[in-house]
Image: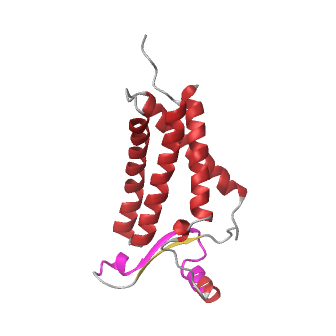
Amino acid sequence: MRILIAGLLGGIAMFIWSSIAHVATPLGTTGINMVTNTASLNDTVATAIDRRDGLYIFDKLVKGSTMGETGFLVFISNAPTAMVPANLIVEFITEVIESVIAAWLLAQTVLVGLGARVGFVTMMGVVASIATNVPYWNWYRFPTSFTIAAIIITLVAYIVAGVAIALVLRPRTTA
């Protein structure tokens, strides 16, 4: 039960930080540019992909050329134009699951000090952020600024979760 409570509180801490990072700081939009002529682009793209939802990569990268234009596109034909509650629910559940796993792993250790325990969870964040973001930067050419911002968001999320988890899930004393 201690693990679940610690994981839930860690997930809440992660969710709060992620919300702040995406809404109140520039981190959530760093490296993302807006298309100015969306009407023209929408019609062209929709026609080019037969209006099929999906993840697309196009042009020179696919053809194997060493230099040239390339793009990475997520196309959704019937997407909401604003954030919907389901997005927040999925994000919250994801962060609680991550934090429960972190709490369970931390409970398997013999780490005693608060710093060591927070550091343990933070290192999970290092692994998570590198495992996802660096390959996207490397293989799909995601912008460096976007990649760095995404890594920062993840690392801070694991730090705040680590603090919450470590404060609740204190090491068991041996008698």
Residue 173: % across, % down: 44, 18
Task: Name the side, left or right, on which 129 lies relative to 96.
Answer: left
Place of residue 15 in the rendered image (x, y in percent of width and height, measured from the top left): 60, 50
- Residue 38: name its quadrant: bottom right
Residue 100 can be seen in this image: no
Viewer-proximal residue among 153 and 91: 153
Colour scheme in the image?
Answer: secondary structure
Q: Residue at x 66, y 54 (%)?
A: 88
**Residue 58 picture quarter:** bottom left
Name the residue located 46 percent from the left edge and 21 percent from the top edge.
172
Please provide the residue range marked out in magenta.
44-65
The residue sitting at 61% across, 69% down in the picture is: 76
Q: Is residue 58 magenta?
A: yes
Q: Is residue 39 above or below residue 51?
A: below
Q: Residue furthest top?
A: 175
In the rendered view, would you say 11 is above or below 130? above
Q: Which residue appears farthest toward the left when viewing the image?
A: 66
Please determine whether, in this image, residue 24 is positioned above or below residue 131: below
The residue closer to the viewer here, 150 or 169, is 169
User: Which of the pair 114/66 is nearer the observer?
Assistant: 114
Where is residue 28 shown, x and y percent of the image?
Answer: 55, 66
Percent coordinates x, y for residue 129 in the rendering: 42, 55
Task: Quarter of the image for the C terminus: give it.
Answer: top left
Vertical placement of residue 1 versus 59, above or below: above
Q: Residue at x 60, y 59 (%)?
A: 20
Tell me how many marks there are: 0
Is residue 10 in view?
Answer: yes
Q: Is residue 63 magenta?
A: yes
